[in-house]
Structures are given as structure tokens and as C-alpha cells.
Amino acid sequence: MNWFHAAENDDVHAFADEVKELGQSLPRFTAHTWYRQPSEADRAKGQFDSEGLMDLSKLEGAFSDPTMQFYLCGPVGFMQFTAKQLVDLGVKQENIHYECFGPHKVL
């Protein structure tokens, strides 16, 4: 299982502790977190893996299995941004699933 997460910083990083705990219990679990605007405290604690917007091209090797399924959730604009990156990396549209929290849109 791969867990890719983007947040502004640690103040709004949902499920950080739960994901860390889950990762310790699953044998084939990897996680990568992007903070768009990390605080100095975030940097000092090493709370994230990459700074800036989510850039999946840096993790291209993580998408080598053509049967992988992707589940996106978040604001519509973020999901569109992420789905486009996945398609650009060769992921089939039918392998990308999403849930909108608000008005439904097609990605």
C-alpha cells in the first residue's frame, strides 16, 4: 500500500498519527507527504518528505504495476491536479477512483 498525502503543514495534516501507526503494522506500506508551506518546526521535526505541491513524477517508480488502483479524496481542484499527473505517468483512467466532498464533478 502506498499513501501519498499533501497538506499545507503539520497544523492541518489530517490522520498523521493514524497513518504512521498503520505504516508500522503493514509489511508493504510506504508513505510520502508533501507540505506546501511547512513551518520551521515542521522542518526541525522532519514532519514531511517533500516541500511544495504534490509532484508524483518524483515517485514514478511507485507506479510500475499496471493493475494498481488509486483512490483520491480532497478538494476537486486537488483531485484534478493529481489525476492528471497519474494519467501523465501512464495510469489508466479506470484505475483512478475518487470521492467528492461537495458538488460532484468529473475529473
Image (tube, helix red, strand yellow):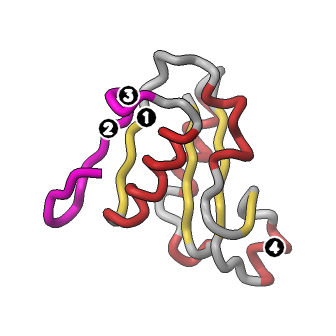
Position of residue 35 relative to residue 61, above or below, is below
CA distance for labels 4 and 1: 29 Å
Q: Residue at x 72, y 82 (%)?
A: 39
- Return the x and y of residue 7 as percentages of the image width and height: 55, 68
SS assignment at label 4: helix
Q: Is residue 66 left or right of residue 41?
A: left
- Return the x and y of residue 86 as percentages of the image width and height: 51, 41
The answer to whether mark 2 and mark 1 are in CB contact below 8 A is: yes
The answer to whether mark 1 and mark 3 are in CB contact below 8 A is: yes
- For badge 2, the amino acid type reads His
- For badge 1, the amino acid type reads Phe
Q: Is residue 10 left or right of residue 69?
A: right
**What residue range appears in magenta?**
92-107
SS assignment at label 2: strand
Foreground pick, 32 / 25: 32
Residue wearing tag 3 = 95
Say few, some or many: other residues with alpha carbon within 10 Å of mark 4 (under 14 / 14 to 19 / 20 or more).
Answer: some
Residue wearing tag 4 = 43
Say few, some or many: other residues with alpha carbon within 10 Å of mark 1 (under 14 / 14 to 19 / 20 or more).
Answer: some
Foreground pick, 19 / 99: 99
Residue wearing tag 1 = 70
Q: Earlier in the sequence, mark 2 or mark 1?
A: 1
- Return the x and y of residue 44 as percentages of the image width and height: 85, 73
CA distance for labels 3 and 4: 34 Å
Residue wearing tag 2 = 97
Position of residue 12 relative to residue 3, above or below, is below
Residue found farthest to the left:
103
